Image: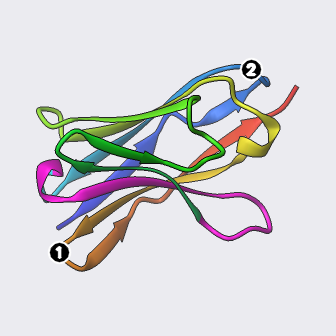
């Protein structure tokens, strides 16, 4: 059974940092395209970053240079290091795994950027 569990969200001041984690079970990360999405209040869910494998990464323009996606296959865990957080980074962040043609989602972790 595929499970994704996010952690690491919280309240942070503008300019601060957080590291999100996505712990996966029921499959190995190397078999999936792993991504982070976020959904801000009143907005649609959007792709933040993806790590398809082979050393490639992809970022939304709004986070490029500030966020870093990575994964540790030995721990079956994906990370999102978020630096220089801004007000408009406030959202619920979701871990996503694309296995074959099916998407799996975590429950989300909330990030609030506020002074």
Q: Is residue 42 above or below residue 9?
A: below
Does the segment drawn in magenta span residue 111?
no
Q: Earlier in the sequence, mark 2 or mark 1?
A: 2
Near-viewer residue (49 or 91): 49
Residue that badge 2 annotates: 15
Quadrant hosting residue 56: top left
The N terminus appears in which quarter of the rendering?
bottom left
Badge 2: how crowded within 10 Å, few (<14), some, or many (20+)?
some
Near-viewer residue (11 or 65): 65
Q: Which residues are magenta?
A: 29-45
Q: Is residue 81 above or below residue 24?
A: above
Horizontal placement of 82 versus 71: left or right? right
Rendered location of residue 106, percent (x, y)? 41, 59
Disc 1 on helix, strand or loop?
loop
In the picture, the disc for residue 100 is 1
Q: Is residue 33 above or below residue 64?
A: below
Q: Which colour assignment does the render follow? A: rainbow
Disc 2 on helix, strand or loop?
loop
Between the residue at mark 2 and the residue at mark 1, the CA separation in whole angstroms equals 38 Å
Near-viewer residue (51 or 19): 51
């Amino acid at each position: 059974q595929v499970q994704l569990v996010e952690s690491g969200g919280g309240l942070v001041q503008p300019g601060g940092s957080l590291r999100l984690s996505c712990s996966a079970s029921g499959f190995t990360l190397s078999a999936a395209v792993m991504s982070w999405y976020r959904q801000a209040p009143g907005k649609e869910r959007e792709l933040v970053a993806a790590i398809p494998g082979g050393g490639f990464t992809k970022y939304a323009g709004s986070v490029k240079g500030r966020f870093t996606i990575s994964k540790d296959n030995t721990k079956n865990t994906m990370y999102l290091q978020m630096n220089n957080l801004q007000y408009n980074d406030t959202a619920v962040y979701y871990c996503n795994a694309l296995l074959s043609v099916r998407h799996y989602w975590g429950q989300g972790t909330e990030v609030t950027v506020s002074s």
